[in-house]
């Protein structure tokens, strides 16, 4: 059964690479169905395998985003950003860094859905392709998720294993924490983006002043951001808390708009515009990952990494960082991190060393590895889904042209920082 699961998993990814993006949800859901029928994942465990929190966040946020775009608020924000940046290259860099700052405190998927509409509005004003800018926003969101305790699920998992609180991510045991490691990586991505977008030197400015008449979507957008931030400080909250926040604000936005306009057709149109393809793609991938986790494949990979590292601390750290990067490019990082944390705890205890260096290496590699491929992280899938709605199909090559150098720069910076500060 394990060999069958591995073969099917590899075949699924091969088809996703070879086929157009619009076919990926069918491939993922088809593979998930075979997994369930064959018993790779029992039907009884399907509900646990699917990350309902992410799916609810996507549905609720997309509804708000659709009204947000319709209100022209992204166009107004775009006007101001265009007046700050000298050319297209710096607009892309500013948007990427802005997304990173937001993502340090809010879930990566929600960040993409909040920031991307502004990027789309900017690109429409400049009459350029939004692909590079939106991908940069997504990969920057993934990077900064590791900066704080509340930035990503994997950060929360690490904090639980290491007994860390919010401030420990900044300063821990008399040394600079992982926040500074992530920020160094973020700074190193700026010259990478300057090189990647070096030809985008067209001057930008905006003489327009967009008029916004409907502020309900902006209130919904700001409200659900505020609630997501506040919820991040609540200890032991239910796993679906963020999902319910986004869903309730999304439904509230629909109801408020309908009360205001009495336009039933517009309400139905907005519900039709929800990116159901992305939701089904993620549901399929969650099921497949649940299957290979259930078969013990992720646990086997974890054991191999530790065995290869042996008792050489530097080699073990290196393997954990770069092995996690490679694995997380294809496997959801949450079950992988959950499996590796107790393994690292046991190995470092046997070696008689503190586990924090390897914890940080795991978090860096697992968080950033998802930036390599368009299906390596939920934020990437959301990003390509938004672009597809705008008529832009993103291939693996298109995404990796930005994702790979971005990942290498950020991981190398964080890898060196962690070693020299924590070894």
Image (cartoon, grey):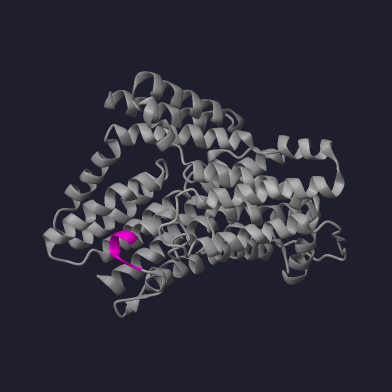
Residue 131 appears in view: no
For the stretch drawn in magenta, the main secondary structure is helix
Residue 260 placement, left or right of 25? right
Give the percent coordinates (x, y) of residue 175: 32, 78
Q: Quadrant of the N terminus?
A: top left
Residue 338 appears in view: yes
In percent of the image, x 40 and y 59: which residue is there?
155
Question: 130 or 194: nearer the eye?
Answer: 130
Give the percent coordinates (x, y) of residue 352: 12, 65
Residue 237 sits above or below residue 34 on the image? below
Question: 388 or 159: nearer the eye?
Answer: 159
In percent of the image, x 45 and y 61: which residue is there?
409
Q: Residue furthest bottom?
A: 174
Give the percent coordinates (x, y) of residue 315: 22, 58
Q: Residue furthest top?
A: 37
Residue 1 placement, left or right of 169? left
Residue 24 on the magenta span: no
Residue 267 placement, left or right of 305? right
Query: Which portion, as a residue range, is magenta?
Result: 160-164
Locate residue 420: give its quadrant.
bottom left
Residue 99 sits above or below residue 26 on the image? below
Give the percent coordinates (x, y) of residue 372: 47, 47
Locate residue 351: give its quadrant.
bottom left
In percent of the image, x 17 and y 56: which residue is there?
347
Q: Quadrant of the C terminus?
A: bottom left
Question: 67 or 267: nearer the eye?
Answer: 267
């Amino acid at each position: 059964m394990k060999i069958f699961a591995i073969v099917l998993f590899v075949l699924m990814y091969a088809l996703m690479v070879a086929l157009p993006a619009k076919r990926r949800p069918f491939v993922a859901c088809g593979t998930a169905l075979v997994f369930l029928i064959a018993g790779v994942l029992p039907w009884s465990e399907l509900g646990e395998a699917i990350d309902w929190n992410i799916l609810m966040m996507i549905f609720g946020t997309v509804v708000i985003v659709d009204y947000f775009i319709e209100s022209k608020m992204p166009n107004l924000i775009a006007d101001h950003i265009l007046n700050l940046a000298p050319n297209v290259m710096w607009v892309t860099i500013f948007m990427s860094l802005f997304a990173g700052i937001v993502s340090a405190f809010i879930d990566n998927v929600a960040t993409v859905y909040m920031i991307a509409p502004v990027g789309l509005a900017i690109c429409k004003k400049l009459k350029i392709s939004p692909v590079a800018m939106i991908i940069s926003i997504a990969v920057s969101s993934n990077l900064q998720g590791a900066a704080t305790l509340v930035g990503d699920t994997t950060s929360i998992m690490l904090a639980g294993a290491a007994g860390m609180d919010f401030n420990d991510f900044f300063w821990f045991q008399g040394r600079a924490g992982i926040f500074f490691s992530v920020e160094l990586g973020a700074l190193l991505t700026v010259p990478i983006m300057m090189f990647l977008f070096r030809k985008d030197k067209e001057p930008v400015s905006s003489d327009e002043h967009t008029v916004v008449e409907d502020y309900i979507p902006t209130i919904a957008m700001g409200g659900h951001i505020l609630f997501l931030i506040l919820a991040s400080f609540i200890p032991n909250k239910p796993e679906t808390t963020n999902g319910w926040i986004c869903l309730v604000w999304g439904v509230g936005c629909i109801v408020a708009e309908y009360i205001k306009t009495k336009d039933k057709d517009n309400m139905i149109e907005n519900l039709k515009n929800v990116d159901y393809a992305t939701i089904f793609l993620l549901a399929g991938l969650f099921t497949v990952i649940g299957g290979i986790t259930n078969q013990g494949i992720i646990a086997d990979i974890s054991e191999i990494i530790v065995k290869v590292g042996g008792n050489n601390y530097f080699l073990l750290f290196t393997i954990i960082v770069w092995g996690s990067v490679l694995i997380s490019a294809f496997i959801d990082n949450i079950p992988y991190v959950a499996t590796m944390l107790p393994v690292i705890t046991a190995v470092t205890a046997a070696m008689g060393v503190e586990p924090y260096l390897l914890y940080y290496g795991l978090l860096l590699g697992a968080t950033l590895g998802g930036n390599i491929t368009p299906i390596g992280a939920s934020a990437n899938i959301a990003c390509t889904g938004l672009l597809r709605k705008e008529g832009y199909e993103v291939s693996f090559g298109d995404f990796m042209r930005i994702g790979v150098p971005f990942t290498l720069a950020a991981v190398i910076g964080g890898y060196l920082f962690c070693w020299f500060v924590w070894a």
